[in-house]
Every structure is written in C-alpha cells, then in structure tokens.
Amino acid sequence: MTKLLTLAALSLSLLSFGAHAANASCDAQAAEKKLAGAAKTSFLKKCNADAGGDAAGKCEAQAAEKKLAGAAKNSFVKKCVSDAGGAPAAAAKEDPKKAATAQCETQAAEKKLAGAAKNSFVKKCVTDAGAK
C-alpha cells in the first residue's frame, strides 16, 4: 500500500513538473516569435492546451486519481474546468439548468449513486439549485 501511495505521489509530481515545463517552453516559443498582447495570450493558451498544461489536463488527472470513468468522469471534468474559469464556465452562464445538472451529476457520482437513487437525487438537487 505504501509503495502504491509513493508511486501515486511521484506520478503527480511528474505531471506537475511536466505542466510547468510546458509553460516555460511555450513562453520561450512566444518570446522567440516576438509575440505580444492578444497574439501572445492566444498563442500561450493554445500552446499550453496542446501541451496538457491547461485546466482540462489538470482536471483529467484529478478524475483519473479518483478512478472516475464514463459519464461521472465527463461530468467531473466539465465542472472542474468550469470552476477553474475555463470555457464551460461561459456555457454555464448561458444555461444555468445545464450547469446545475452537471454539478448534481458530479455529486451523485461522488456519492456513488446509481439507477433510481441517482435520478431522484439529481432531480431534487437541480430543483433545489433553482430555488436559490
């Protein structure tokens, strides 16, 4: 068990180092291309996303750590990216019910609910979120 935890910690530290290295590499590339302002911001955003240093990459790693799969994983990643201020946050502003449903689905997955219990929980959760 200790070996497994040590291996998991090592893996996470390597992922963190990889994201940092990707950011440094993207900064160097932007400087080499002499980019500034919006062009630099856009380039860095795309470069970091391609390198896996974006919020989605971090959220994917967290989902793998929690051993989530399928719809639970997708819902978790979507909410995680949204909480980090990524693109899905804008979609959540456009459709609050969809955002509430995604959040409630994530909560149901965390509680390991399935079938009718999950459906009932999500329905009540979405209703409660709308009442606030």
Image: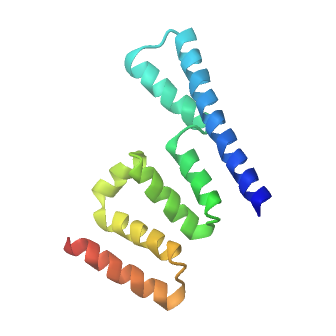
In this rendering, the answer to whether 128 lies above or below 31 is: below
Residue at 56% across, 29% down: 47
Residue at 41% across, 87% down: 120
The x and y percentages for residue 129 are 27, 72
Image side of residue 11 versus residue 123, left or right: right
The residue most toward the bottom is 116
The x and y percentages for residue 84 are 42, 47
Q: Which image quadrant is residue 48 in?
A: top right
Is 94 in front, or is 55?
55
Which part of the image, by quadrant, shows the N terminus?
bottom right
Residue at 55% across, 69% down: 72
The x and y percentages for residue 110 are 51, 72
Q: Which scheme is used to colour this image of the protein?
A: rainbow
Image side of residue 98 versus residue 45, left or right: left
In this rendering, the answer to whether 28 lies above or below 62 is: above
Which part of the image, by quadrant, shows the C terminus?
bottom left
Residue at 72% across, 57% down: 5
Q: Give the total number of marks visible in the rendering.
A: 0
The residue most toward the left is 132
In this rendering, the answer to whether 11 lies above or below 21 is: below
The x and y percentages for residue 104 are 40, 72
The residue most toward the front is 2
In this rendering, the answer to whether 125 lies above or below 23 is: below
Image side of residue 1 versus residue 99, left or right: right
